[in-house]
Image (cartoon, grey):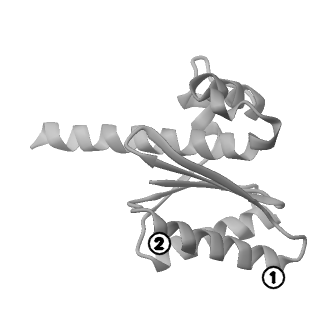
Amino acid sequence: MAAVCQSRRQVSLAIFHNLNLEYTRSRTLASSTIQAEATIVGFLNWAFQQFEISAVALLTAIPDTRGSHLEALAETTALRFGIPVWRVTSDDLFHAFAYPPLRSRQQLREVVSGIWPEMVNPETLMMQDAVATGAFVQVERMFLAAREEATL
């Protein structure tokens, strides 16, 4: 499973196999929209060819921003490969990683850094968001599979 988190200036990817974090990488995006689009499509095409991806988790961006445009491009790229997409909001993550729910991405990143100490680095902030998104979706998928199995 691949988790993708993008902002206006960066795209991060986290690859999971079950609950194991297998790979992480970020790319800086150019200020030119055309170059940023090419970077995201190329990066995801490469990832989808390198890894066996069964689903893509996308952390949703603020609507009507460059980030939301790039998010839609990431979704289109995944769907072109026939890979289903899960959309995840920040609120989903805030509620999933703590009770009472977290209130900020900073708090979420602290939790992620506690689980994956190799993520403690100011340069990995967007990557921490991708890791949180991927972990959330992997656990959700495991619960759904267990529920389906129990009803059989």
Compare marks 1 and 2 and give the one earlier in the sequence.
Answer: 1
Task: Please tell me in which quadrant of the rendered image residue 65 appears.
Answer: bottom right
Give the residue pinned by disc 2.
Answer: 49
In the image, residue 147 sits, relative to residue 82, either above or below, namely above
Residue for point 59% across, 42% down: 131
**Residue type (three-letter) at the residue carrying disc 2:** Gln
Task: Please tell me in which quadrant of the rendered image residue 43 appears.
Answer: bottom right
In the image, residue 69 sits, relative to residue 6, either above or below, namely below
Whether residue 64 can be seen here: no
Q: Report crowding for label 1: few under 14, some 14 to 19, many 20 or more residues within 10 A (C-alpha).
A: few
Residue 77 horizontal/vertical position (percent): 56, 75
Q: Quadrant of the C terminus?
A: top left
Residue 121 horizontal/vertical position (percent): 77, 34
Which residue appears farthest toward the top when viewing the image? 100
Residue for point 81% across, 79% down: 35
User: Which element type, helix, strand or loop, lies under badge 2?
Assistant: helix
Whether residue 36 can be seen here: yes
Give the residue pinned by disc 1.
Answer: 34
Residue for point 84% across, 60% down: 9
